[in-house]
Image: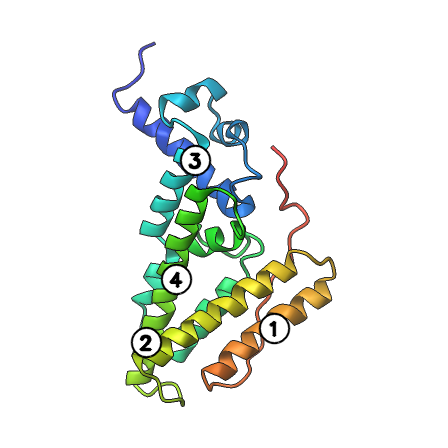
Amino acid sequence: MPYSPDHKSKSKERILASATELFCRFGFDKVSINQVMKLARLTHGAFYAHFESKEALYKASFLKTLKGSSACRLAKAPLSINHLTQLVSNLLNLRTLSGQNRPSPENFLFNEIGSDSVEIRTLYEKSYVSILKLVENRIVALGKLKKVPVVINRSSAAEKSRAILTSLVGAVAISRSIQSDEEISRVLTAAQNQILTMLGVGELALSYSSPNPKDTLQL
């Protein structure tokens, strides 16, 4: 039976969707082409009809995620300190895919720390700059509306945005390297409270999701 005219485009979308899910959960190095194709329910040989390499697939996956990211939608939400702290909480919960509606650039940001690949590092920087600007713009807007109790201009917002991402990435990196759920919760809570204090809004309880023991790469 001959394939339908849109068969190739549908197959490519299946590969891309499967790759995005796996890359966001486990990172570039821990995902193989075979795992992507198995999740997409396609043969391994069909991969090269759509992508020339795993790196090319990763780039396509990243750019698609960046374009349709939940962070971009959040940036268009009503301006309030609650929406900013929601962003903080969401970023801190990115140790697992649970609780995330869809992949976002933050997943890539946490998964690819210290990559040796020049191409992956280039995409990492693109993700970093995107999130940095999102947080900076949010802080500036809240400052103009006087919804944060500290004086904020563009320069200080940029510095606060960098400090926020530094705290987030450091906290998640540490949490991935220790086994105690109790200590992980403390690390993430400390990072969030540091960020909230920096913004002058005090400490809030952290909504933290413990890792799902089934959330491992077994395909």
Closer to the eye: label 2 or 3: 3
**Mark 2 residue type:** Leu
Q: Which mark is residue 55?
A: 3
Q: Quadrant of the N terminus?
A: top left
Residue 210 position, x and y percent, is 65, 59
Label 2–label 3 contact, CB within 8 A = no
SS category of the residue bearing label 3: helix
Q: Which is nearer the N-term, disc 1 or disc 2?
A: 2
Estimate how packed mark 1 is, as few (under 14), some (14 to 19) or many (20 or more) residues with alpha carbons within 10 Å: many
Residues at marks 2 and 4, CA–CA distance in whole angstroms: 17 Å
Q: Which residue is mark 4?
A: 131
The one of 195 and 206 positioned closer to us in this rendering: 195
Q: Given the current orientation, which residue lies at the most extreme left position?
A: 5
Residues at marks 1 and 2, CA–CA distance in whole angstroms: 24 Å
Q: Which mark is residue 79?
A: 2
Q: Which mark is residue 12?
A: none
**Mark 1 residue type:** Thr
Q: Which residue is mark 1?
A: 189
Residues at marks 3 and 4, CA–CA distance in whole angstroms: 22 Å
